[in-house]
Image (cartoon, rainbow, N blue to C red):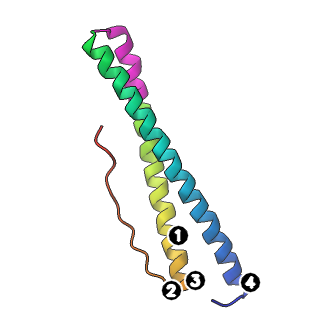
Amino acid sequence: MDSSPKSMDKLAMLTAAEGRFQRACDQIVLLNIRLEDTQKRYKRAKNENHRVFRYPLRLRLASIEGVRNMYYDYAFNMAERVAELRQELFNETVEIVSVSGPKA
């Protein structure tokens, strides 16, 4: 790697993209935990036949899943960007493995 201004800019972009990717992954983990907790509450309300609680919980589940899916897309885009920058800077080949999210 040379120390030209262009490569220094790309290195800064790589560092920023890696940070954004890591933060997106952290958010996905938190959203998965929240989704699991909300699913437990929904199942309990369903088993105990508390209809008044089920509808708001279903809406919350849908919202959490939607936000999580957007974070999945964002994290995948950041992973692609990191892979591109690593290829340009260090001539590394990075394989991005796409795994579908957990079944809801």
Near mark 2 (Cα within 10 A), the count class, few <14, some 14-19 or many ≥20, is: few
Nearer the viewer's eye, disc 4 or disc 3? 3
| Residue 7 falls in image quadrant | bottom right
In the figure, is residue 27 to the left or right of 54?
right
Quadrant of the frame with the C terminus: top left
Give the label on residue 91, or none: 2
Distance between mark 3 and mark 2 Cα atoms? 6 Å
First in residue order: circle 4 vs circle 3: 4
20 relative to 70 in the view: left or right = right
- Distance of mark 3 from mark 1, alpha carbons? 10 Å
Q: Please name the amino acid that badge 1 sits on.
A: Val
Q: Which mark is residue 89?
A: 3
| SS at circle 1 | helix
Q: Earlier in the sequence, mark 3 or mark 1?
A: 1
User: Would you call the spot at circle 1 few (<14 residues within 10 Å), some (14-19), or many (20 or more)?
Assistant: many
Residue 38 higher or lower than 6, as above or below: above
Q: CA distance from mark 2 to mark 4?
A: 18 Å
Report which residue position mark 1 lands on: 82
Choose top left, top right, bottom left or bottom right for residue 32.
Answer: top left
**Residue bounds of the magenta highlight:** 49-61
Report the residue marked by disc 4. 5
Callout 3 amino acid: Leu
